[in-house]
């Protein structure tokens, strides 16, 4: 997931989560998120996932302007902390932190299995010694 932190404009301070891709932004309400800012086109920018599961961005209109980390660019791959500028809108992109799912039940099962194996081996050793 991507987290877009809006730095300027009417929505400054807001954070937007991009959970599904492709994720389009622009002025139009049909986009996944719309920005009513000067210089933002109706369909301005899209974030998508490649076959290799990398995240990339590209302009949707040839006359639209995009600056990433101070350089004018049309298409590229997303890096954590990139600063995007489209028109007067500035936002920074971060990868959301990962959350480990709960493995407590599996860990308990594995440790109990190890304990059962050790106890069974001790029982066999004792059984063989008494025979």
Image (cartoon, rainbow, N blue to C red):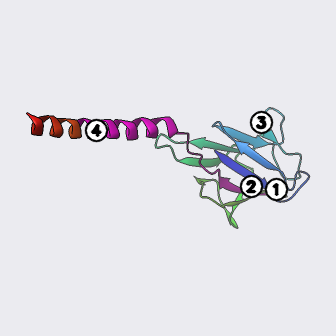
> Element under label 3?
loop
Q: Is residue 112 magenta?
A: yes
Circles 3, 4 touching at the beta carbon (< 8 Å): no
Return the residue at label 1.
87
> Element under label 1?
loop
Work out whether residue 38 or residue 5 is closer to the camera in this orientation and state it.
5
Q: Nearer the viewer, mark 1 or mark 4?
A: 4
Say few, some or many: other residues with alpha carbon within 10 Å of mark 2 (under 14 / 14 to 19 / 20 or more): some
Decide if residue 112 is on the left or right side of residue 120.
right
Decide if residue 102 is on the left or right side of residue 36.
left
Query: In the rendered structure, which segment of residues is drawn in magenta?
Result: 91-120
Q: Nearer the viewer, mark 1 or mark 3?
A: 3
Q: Is residue 21 magenta?
A: no
| 3D distance between C-alphas at marks 1 and 4 | 70 Å
Circles 1, 3 touching at the beta carbon (< 8 Å): no
> Element under label 4?
helix
The disc, 2 or 3, on the residue closer to the chain's N-terminal end is: 3
Circles 2, 1 touching at the beta carbon (< 8 Å): yes
| 3D distance between C-alphas at marks 2 and 1 | 7 Å
Q: Quadrant of residue 85?
A: bottom right
User: Residue 69's mark?
Assistant: none
Q: Is residue 28 above or below residue 99?
A: above
At which x and y percent is residue 98? 59, 48
Q: Quadrant of the N terminus?
A: top right
The disc, 3 or 4, on the residue closer to the chain's N-terminal end is: 3
| 3D distance between C-alphas at marks 3 and 4 | 62 Å
The disc, 1 or 3, on the residue closer to the chain's N-terminal end is: 3
At which x and y percent is residue 116? 32, 35
Residue at 85% across, 45% down:
35
Return the residue at label 4.
119
């Amino acid at each position: 997931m991507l987290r877009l932190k809006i730095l300027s404009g009417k929505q400054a301070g807001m954070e937007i989560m991009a959970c599904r891709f492709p994720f389009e932004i622009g002025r139009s309400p049909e986009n996944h998120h719309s920005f009513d800012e000067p210089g933002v086109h109706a369909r301005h920018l899209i974030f998508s996932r490649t076959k290799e599961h990398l995240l990339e961005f590209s302009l949707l209109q040839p006359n639209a302007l995009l600056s990433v980390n101070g350089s004018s660019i049309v298409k590229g791959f997303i890096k954590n902390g990139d600063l995007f500028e489209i028109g007067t809108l500035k936002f920074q992109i971060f990868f959301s932190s990962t959350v480990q799912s709960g493995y407590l039940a599996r860990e308990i099962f594995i440790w109990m299995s190890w304990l059962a194996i050790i106890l069974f081996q001790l029982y066999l050793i004792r059984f063989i010694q008494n025979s």
